[in-house]
Amino acid sequence: MEAGSCGIEEMALESMMDQWKGLEIGQAREEVERLRGKGQALKAVDLAELGLARWPGDLRLTQLKALCLADSGAVFR
C-alpha cells in the first residue's frame, strides 16, 4: 500500500487512522517524514502518535514526533 498516493494529508483524522492501520512500520515512518517535508508538521505529529500507539517505544517515530513538534513551534508539548 502506498499511503502517499491516497492524499493522506487531506484526510480527516478518522480516515487517517483507518489508513494508518494498513501500514507497516517502515511505511509509517516514511509517511510521517513525507508529511513533515511537505510542511504538514501537525498532521505528522498526529500520525507519529498513532504509530507510537501501535508500535510503542519505536525510536525513529519518537524522534520524528519530536522533530515535527519542533517544526510546529510546540516545543513544550
Image (cartoon, rainbow, N blue to C red):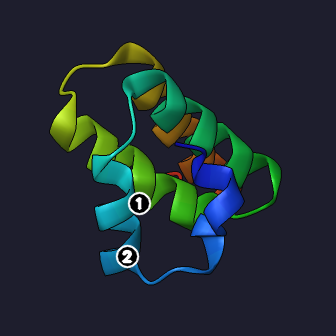
Q: Could you tell whether 24 is left or right of 30 in the image?
A: left
- For mark 2, does the 10 Å Cα neighbourhood hold few (<14), some (14 to 19), or many (20 or more) residues? few
Q: Is residue 42 visible?
A: yes
Question: Which of the 4 image quarters holds residue 62?
Answer: top left
Can you tell which of label 1 and label 2 is closer to the viewer?
A: 2
Residue 13: where, in percent of width, then height?
38, 77
Question: Which of the 4 image quarters holds residue 9?
Answer: bottom right
Residue 28: where, in percent of width, then height?
47, 36
* Rendered residue at 31%/19% (across/down): 58
3D distance between C-alphas at marks 1 and 2: 12 Å
Q: Could you tell whether 9 is left or right of 18 in the image?
A: right
Give SS at disc 1.
helix
Give SS at disc 2.
helix
Question: Which of the marked residues, 1 or 2, is nearer the chain's N terminus?
Answer: 2
Query: What label does residue 72 carry, if any?
Result: none
Query: What label does residue 46 carry, if any?
Result: 1
* Residue 30 drawn above or below residue 71: above
Q: Which amino acid does label 2 sit on?
A: Ser
Q: Which of 69 and 9 is in front in this view?
A: 9
- The residue wearing badge 2 is 15
Q: What residue type is labelled 1?
A: Asp
Residue 53: where, in percent of width, then height?
18, 42
| Residue furthest to the top | 59
* Rendered residue at 38%/29% (across/down): 24
* Rendered residue at 52%/42% (across/down): 1
